[in-house]
Amino acid sequence: MADQQRVLIIGGVATGPKTAARLKRLTPEADVTLIDRDSIVSYGACGLPYYVEGLFEDVNELINTPVGVPRNAMFFNKVKGFKVLTRTEALKIDRQAGTVRVRNLDSGEESDMPYDKLVIATGGYPFRPPIPGVDLKNVWFMTHPSHAESLVREIGAQGLKKAVLVGAGFIGIEMAEALIHRGVEVTIVEMMDQIMPGILDKDVATFAAKHLRQKGVRLVLGERVTGIGGTDRVTSVDTDKQSIETDLAVIAVGTRPNDALAREAGLSCMEQGGIVINEYCQTSDPDIYAGGDCVVNTYAGGAAGSQLFVALGSTANKHGRVIANHIAGSPTPFAGISCTGIVRAFDFSLGRTGLSEKQAKALNLDVETVTWAGPDMPHYIPGAGPFVIKMIASKRDRKLLGVQVAGMGNGAKRLDVAASMILMGGTLDDVANIDFGYAPPFSPPIDPLATCAHILTNKLDGLAKSISAFEARDRIEQGDVLLIDVRTPGEFEEMRLPYDVTHIPLGALRDKAASLPKDRDILAFCKVSMRGYEAQRILNAAGFDRVRFIEGGIVGWPFEVKMLKQ
């Protein structure tokens, strides 16, 4: 690389600063300049809901380094060695001349900045639904520290008590918890009939929604927002079915790639949005790179076969490293994404990696799934709580395709392991053979992820014959199904499914099997359906061939149960 190669970076939140800092470490002689139209750069946008919640008091913590130094232009110049120009907007890329037309937003002065290599890191922007009232006072988007700061300020100044969150994705779920902790009543309105519709399958989402309702969040699902009512400030959020009174609204209906500069410069972009890049984050012009929320990614698992837009700060930082390495002459390809995402929802972790069941079926993949339920620690360790894992695998080669988690257990640990397996093309046997870290405060002797893989292997081998909670509910409501609860009498007296149930403790099942009908479908279950699986095998051995167990048991049942003892 020639000395003093000029590298110009447009965008200063994640990919931009990461590219610049890495590049200066690799090639100190490079002339690196980063521009951004904002007055601040390199802030942690993903931390905004946690500032609103009150986990830290100074919003500038999202801009500071861990030791309290602001990541501003002076910091990047003195510590990282590259120039930062804030309040500088990129207007147009001239690829033939190798320049970018920029405007100083304070003076209005325009000039051309030359480059040898250009990096587009313009990020994404929040989708503004085309509905009346979106510009009223007390309507917020949540993408910038100023948004979070003004929301907290106005909650106190105006005494705001009711909030409607439009959208039940990551931001909507995080903001629900944050506002509940602020003493604000929260309603989430989601156009789809489940929370986190682009992330979780409906069965896992329904289990998670049950927890949100228990924590005081009102969920309005399957309703489309048609407008925001009020004159000077919001007073209601109106759907196609009702009007919901509120003091404030947060719009969180997704992010769109900010690809306008690239599109106007003639760079290849997807029709639905997003700059197309290769494995080194090069655009269709090899001297122009792009990364972060303005681009589309390939799927790391190899099964999706299409370009994906997933806006995540973790991916943006990876792009920055790949770009810097390639410019510096040390190419390291980006392997793609596995669609890994996780969110905290009160006591629950909710997340997914790989393909959902819905996505896999849309791709015409022949898959098998299973849902496991139980605690992520032994029952005698304080803090163990309900936790479900849904696993999707290929029937053809048993490769792991996707994992979803919901519950009080350590979902992040299981997702990270599953994401590694998917990236490496691992099978169910590979998951089961992982040498997980074991001690009672961290997991049972067989980690829940391995247990889930065991069940799914048994299902593929024809040993485990199960039915999902959604399928079970449909069969029960259709009638002519015998429900057998094989829990202990004490458990049976605490809670039950709200249906006609035959109670036979597992220890008595062999003796009482002869009294059961062989000409009816039998659904067995227990607390988490380990005993339900045992019941299925016992009855199979006794000549019953119409037996299945309900995956997840009562712990994983996503619908209401009948509580007899509190």
Image (tube, rainbow, N blue to C red):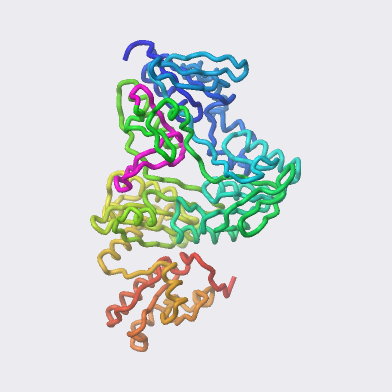
Q: Residue at x 59, y 58 (%)?
A: 220
The image position of residue 339, as x and y in percent, is 40, 45
Q: Is residue 96 left or right of residue 248?
A: left
Occupied quadrant, residue 369: bottom left
Residue nearer the viewer, 70 or 481: 481
The quarter of the image holding the C terminus is: bottom right
Q: Is residue 305 left or right of residue 388?
A: left
Against 521, residue 5 (above or below) is above
Residue 296 magenta? yes
Q: Residue at x 44, y 19 (%)?
A: 8
The image position of residue 397, as x and y in percent, is 23, 55
Residue found at the far top of this picture: 3
The image position of residue 261, as x and y in percent, is 46, 27
Residue found at the far right of this picture: 158
Q: Which residues are magenta?
A: 285-313
Q: Residue at x 28, y 56 (%)?
A: 394
Q: Is residue 82 visible?
A: yes
The quarter of the image holding the N terminus is: top left
Q: Residue at x 67, y 55 (%)?
A: 244
